[in-house]
Image: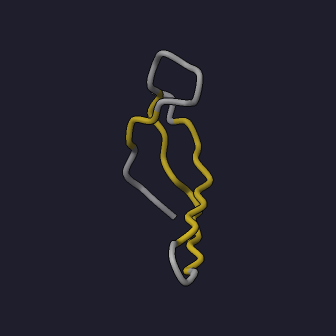
Amino acid sequence: GGYRAFLWKPPKHNRTVRVVCREWSITDNARYSDFSCTIEQVVG
């Protein structure tokens, strides 16, 4: 999993939150790649 937090702006919100991606996966297709990430908000 990830260890470096980054700023993310949730859809339909006006502010960014600090998150870390704990789990991720990627699926390669013929013309594109699907990327999925489970993020967790960092407090403090």
Quick one: 35 or 18, which is closer to the camera?
35
Q: Residue at x 55, y 19 (%)?
A: 13
Quick one: 31 or 20, which is closer to the camera?
31
Q: Residue at x 59, y 22 (%)?
A: 12
Q: Residue furthest front?
A: 31
- x then y, percent, for residue 16: 44, 25
- x then y, percent, for residue 9: 48, 30
Q: Residue furthest top?
A: 14
Q: Residue at x 58, y 29 (%)?
A: 11
Number of on-image labels: 0
Q: Is residue 40 above or below residue 10?
A: below
Residue 37: which quarter of the image?
bottom right
Q: Is residue 27 above or below residue 6?
A: below
Residue 19 appears left or right of 7: right
What's the colour scheme? secondary structure
Q: Is residue 6 above or below residue 2?
A: above
Q: Residue at x 55, y 36 (%)?
A: 41
In which quadrant of the rendered image does the C terminus lie? Answer: top left
- x then y, percent, for residue 10: 55, 30
Quick one: 42 or 12, which is closer to the camera?
12
